[in-house]
Amino acid sequence: MRWEAANRQRRLPSESPYWHFMAQHKDRLRGNHRMRMLYGNWNKMGDETQRTVLAQAEHYLNTIEQL
């Protein structure tokens, strides 16, 4: 939980679409040894934070023409 609180304010807007892509393609990418650390960080975020990040990404992707 400390990780989530410490990093919540420092997240960049560009991070959520990145994590959206990583979550969407997890089954395909997680077997790559270079991705272990990335998915480890994703798992450390916790379910609530992951849902928040993915919802933010969905918002950006749905309103990309207005951004």
Image (cartoon, grey):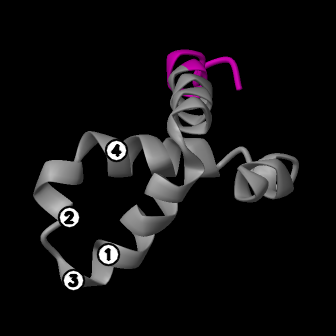
Which residue does the numbered mark 1 point to in the structure image? Answer: 36
Q: Position of residue 42 (x, y in %)?
A: 47, 56
Residue bearing the label numbered 4? 23
Mark 4, secondary structure of its residue: helix
Q: Are marks 3 and 1 in contact (CB under 8 Å)?
A: yes
Q: Do the CB atoms of the residues marked 2 and 3 lie less than 8 Å apart? A: no
Comparing labels 4 and 1, the label whose residue is closer to the camera: 1
| Mark 3 to mark 1 CA distance (whole Å) | 6 Å
Within-10-Å neighbours for mark 1: few <14, some 14–19, many 20+? few
Crowding near pointer 3: few (<14 within 10 Å), some, many (20+)? Answer: few
* Residue located at (51% from left, 42% from top): 17
Mark seen at residue 33: 3
Q: Write down the region rendered in magenta.
A: 59-67
Q: Amino acid at mark 1?
A: Arg
Please say if 24 is above or below 10: above
Secondary element at tag 2: loop
- Give the residue drawn at x 45%, y 54%: 43
**Label 3 element class:** helix
Q: Is residue 62 magenta?
A: yes
24 lies left or right of 19? left
**Callout 2 amino acid:** Arg
61 within the magenta span? yes
- Look at the numbered discs 4 and 2 and tell me whether their residues touch, using CB distance below 8 Å: no
The residue shown at (47%, 48%) is: 19
Q: Is residue 52 visible?
A: yes
User: On the rendered structure, is 11 left or right of 51?
Assistant: right
CA separation in Å, label 2 and label 3: 7 Å
Residue at screen point 32% across, 75% down: 36
The amino acid type found where label 4 is placed reads Ala
* Relative vertical location of residue 66 with respect to residue 56 in this rendering, above or below: above
Picture quadrant of residue 24: top left
Mark-to-mark CA distance, 3 and 4:
16 Å
